[in-house]
Image (tube, rainbow, N blue to C red):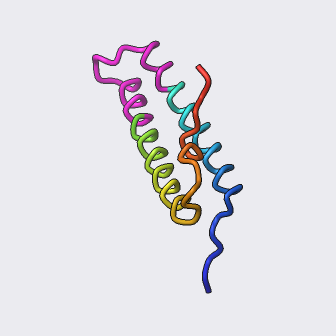
Amino acid sequence: MTKPRFTAAEHAALGESLARVHDVILTEKVKIEQSFPTTRPGHSQKASQALKKALAAVDEARYAMENELIVDYPSASTWVYFPQRGN
């Protein structure tokens, strides 16, 4: 039995969710780096490194799902998983 693929709307919803997760992790990482010394080993440095790895994992998932989107919807926007944010 074949698993059902995502609809375009499901891709859009997941893309927005993953983008929000990325933004939250990045914001918290920056807060830690601005509040604690990162030049000496310690818990804050470990936290910052862990959040850096989490960002990489979220982005890896976003790229993988973007590839799935393009397979199913070749004319789809590449901004679904990497939406433009207002400055």
On the image, which quarter does residue 34 sit in? top left
In the rendered view, would you say 79 is above or below 42? Answer: below
- Percent position of residue 37, x then y: 36, 14
- Percent position of residue 61, x then y: 48, 52
In the rendered view, would you say 10 is above or below 17? Answer: below
Which segment did they paint magenta? 29-51
| Residue in the picture at 39% in, 26% down | 43
Q: Main secondary structure of the magenta part?
A: helix
Furthest residue toward front: 75
Furthest residue toward right: 9
In the rendered view, would you say 70 is above or below 34? Answer: below
Furthest residue toward bottom: 1
Q: Nearer the viewer, residue 20 or 77?
A: 77
On the image, which quarter does residue 85 sit in? top right
Report whether 21 appears left or right of 67. right
| Residue in the picture at 48% in, 58% down | 67
On the image, which quarter does residue 75 sit in? bottom right
Q: Nearer the viewer, residue 35 or 41?
A: 35
Screen quadrant of the N terminus: bottom right
| Residue in the picture at 37% in, 31% down | 46
| Residue in the picture at 58% in, 61% down | 73
Report how many numbered discs are placed on residues in the image. 0
- Percent position of residue 21, x then y: 58, 39
Is residue 52 on the magenta stretch?
no
Screen quadrant of the C terminus: top right
- Percent position of residue 30, x then y: 47, 21
Is residue 31 on the magenta stretch?
yes
In the rendered view, would you say 11 is above or below 43? Answer: below
